[in-house]
């Protein structure tokens, strides 16, 4: 049971208008946003930040951003965000082989060295204490420019907020996210956990 009950999607008109973004990314408005709208300034600011962070500017593709989000959420243990991130990666065109083997990104041939550097950065930046070091930096700079690194850290930081929000809140997980979690992550033990 969630710490705070999500409100009806029609509760705040501006949040509802802004949350149309999620119909594209997930196919539904997440319960996390429906809970945030108890303080509409938070829900509106969060949606706008999410849109800015997830905007596609080029080589850090929409699919890669969602895989970065998955690695970050996996590192923190947030099952809600793991399922959302893998669902959004699928909806944004991540290759089937990458979706099926996201757990093995470090060694699976479907992933490029550039993707591995990005995903290792996500892992290093998401654990506590943070372990981003000169080796991670050097690998990033082999493949990505500074603007792209800022984009990646934007995703990692956004999901740091979401991981803490949803795990502390015990946010109820939506059916579509459950389907994606079970399909791509279930073979490694993913389940709804407290997000019933």
Image (cartoon, helix red, strand yellow):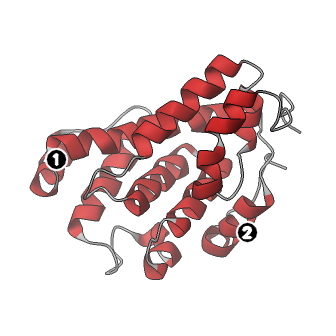
Structural crowding at the residue carrying mark 1, measured as other residues with C-alpha within 10 Å and reported as few (<14), some (14–19) or many (≥20): few
Asked whether the viewer can see residue 176, the reply is yes
Q: Mark 1 points at which residue?
A: 135
- Of badges 2 and 1, the one in the foreground is 2
Residue 85 is left or right of residue 145, and the answer is right
Q: Circles 2 and 1: CB distance less than 8 Å? A: no
Closest to the observer: 172 or 123?
Answer: 172
Q: Going from the N terminus, do you reach mark 2 or mark 1 first?
A: 1
Q: Mark 2 points at which residue?
A: 179
x, y percentage for residue 49? 48, 32
Q: Is mark 1 on a helix, strand or loop?
A: helix
x, y percentage for residue 156? 42, 41
Q: Is mark 2 on a helix, strand or loop?
A: helix
x, y percentage for residue 16? 71, 36
Structural crowding at the residue carrying mark 2, measured as other residues with C-alpha within 10 Å and reported as few (<14), some (14–19) or many (≥20): some
Residue drawn at (42%, 37%), measured in percent from left and top?
52
Residue 21 is left or right of residue 196, and the answer is left
Residue drawn at (67%, 65%), measured in percent from left and top?
181
Residue drawn at (36%, 34%), measured in percent from left and top?
130
Query: Which label sits on residue 68?
Result: none
Residue 22 is left or right of residue 95, and the answer is right
Closest to the observer: 112 or 95?
Answer: 95
């Amino acid at each position: 049971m969630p710490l705070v009950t999500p409100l009806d999607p029609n509760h705040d008109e501006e949040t509802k208008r802004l949350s149309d973004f999620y119909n594209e990314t997930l196919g539904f408005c997440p319960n996390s946003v429906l809970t945030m709208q108890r303080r509409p300034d938070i829900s509106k600011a969060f949606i706008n930040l999410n849109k800015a962070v997830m905007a596609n500017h080029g080589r850090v593709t929409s699919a890669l951003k969602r895989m970065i989000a998955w690695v970050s959420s996996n590192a923190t243990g947030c099952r809600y965000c793991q399922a959302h991130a893998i669902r959004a990666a699928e909806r944004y065109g991540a290759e089937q082989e990458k979706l099926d083997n996201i757990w093995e990104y470090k060694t699976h041939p479907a992933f490029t060295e550039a993707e591995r550097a990005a995903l290792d950065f996500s892992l290093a930046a998401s654990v506590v204490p943070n372990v981003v070091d000169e080796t991670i930096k050097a690998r990033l700079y082999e493949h990505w420019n500074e603007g792209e690194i800022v984009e990646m850290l934007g995703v990692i930081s956004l999901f740091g907020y979401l991981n803490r929000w949803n795990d502390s809140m015990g946010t109820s997980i939506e059916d579509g996210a459950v389907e994606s979690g079970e399909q791509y992550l279930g073979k490694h033990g993913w389940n709804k956990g407290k997000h019933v």
